[in-house]
Amino acid sequence: MKRMITILALVTLLLTVLLTACSGEDPIANPPAENPNNAAPVDNPEEELAEEAVVEEDSAAPAIEVVDALGNTLILDAPATRIVSLAPSLTEALFAIGAGDQVVGREDFANYPAEALELPTIGGTFGELNTEAILDLTPDLVMVAPLSSAEQVQSLMDVGLTVFMMPNPTTLEEMYDSLRIAAVITGHEAETEILIESFEIRVADIVEIISAAETTPLVFYELDSTDPSAPWTAGPGTFIDTLITMAGGQNLGASLQGDWVQVSSEELLALNPEIIILGDAIWGVTTEDVAARPGWDAIAAVANGMVYPFNDDLASRPGPRLVDGLEELAKLIHPELFE
């Protein structure tokens, strides 16, 4: 039997040599490949699969990693898809960059865009937050603004929620940066860059128009006249101050101390603003109300009919509608340049 096997092996070898000779190839110099790609033989298939997994993991998109206003690092494996927004400005920003469908809850005062009004509310930043309502929405991220108290933020983290505090912008450039951060978190970088570019073009156009202004009128921006003898206004360094300046006016509150300041009727009469902007018009204050205040008829703005109602949301919320606010203020302060 062994002899038969030996004979068959010799015959097989002889046939192989003859066939190789006919083909012109050297069987020793050109051994047959063991796999179609001439790859080195794999002793351990499991090891090869592990190596392929590492390559795929290395080629995958990196995790989202951003630092918030509190210095905390947010790490996400993928863009957030269920966001609860606890500031009107953040809600507006998320919708503006194309992430509106990823917002599942909003703060009570968030009223723009119209689609946001369809979202469930979870309380107010200045009041009680409904933590149970937030948990019921099963968010993968809760976005807050610096207006939220440290206690509120901690209470949300204590129940296991992932919280990100957006930095508070004080300039248009910082507002653009905030939009970029929101874009990274939600996966809308491309749309956001297009949006920011459109804002930059609009702002540049306004600045160019305002550069032709021959005057810089004194502007009193009224925020709250609950006490009409001592209304509140915006101080230096606020967005309202910035927008009035960019719109070719001089903010009366810029010479005062603090972000939000009360001004007495006596001070207003002495400073005599040429234009009054009623940011509190959204609360029902009218030009007739202002004219009826004792002594205010002597103020130049009242005497000359230059008291204007204004949507304060366009100037007080550090979000994408600040550009709209700038345009509106420029037209009110220098109407002659927009005729």
Image (spheres, rainbow, N blue to C red):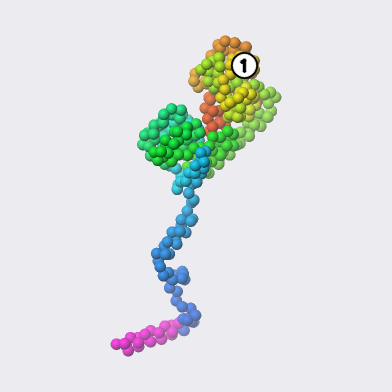
At x 58%, y 29%, the residue is 238
At x 61%, y 16%, the residue is 268
Residue 243 picture location, percent across and down: 60, 29
Q: What span is colored magenta in the figure? A: 1-20
Residue 187 picture location, percent across and down: 48, 44
Farthest residue, direction bottom: 3
Q: How many numbered discs?
A: 1
At x 49%, y 42%, the residue is 72
Q: Which residue is mark 1?
A: 267
Instruction: Tell me if mark 1 has few (under 14), some (14-19) or many (20+) residues whose alpha carbon lies within 10 angstroms of its own.
Output: few
Farthest residue, direction right: 214
Please check the rendered image and state whether residue 238 is part of the magenta-colored stretch, yes or no.
Answer: no
The quadrant in which the N terminus is found is bottom left
Q: Main secondary structure of the magenta part?
A: helix
Residue 335 appears in view: no
Relative to 324, 164 lies left or right: left
In which image quadrant can residue 308 be found? top right
**Is 33 rendered above or below residue 118?**
below
The quadrant in which the C terminus is found is top right
Amino acid type for the residue under numbered disc 1? Glu
Of residues 305 and 220, the one nearer the viewer is 220
**Is 180 rendered above or below residue 225?**
below
At x 41%, y 31%, the residue is 129
**Is 97 rendered above or below residue 37?**
above
Residue 25 picture location, percent across and down: 48, 81
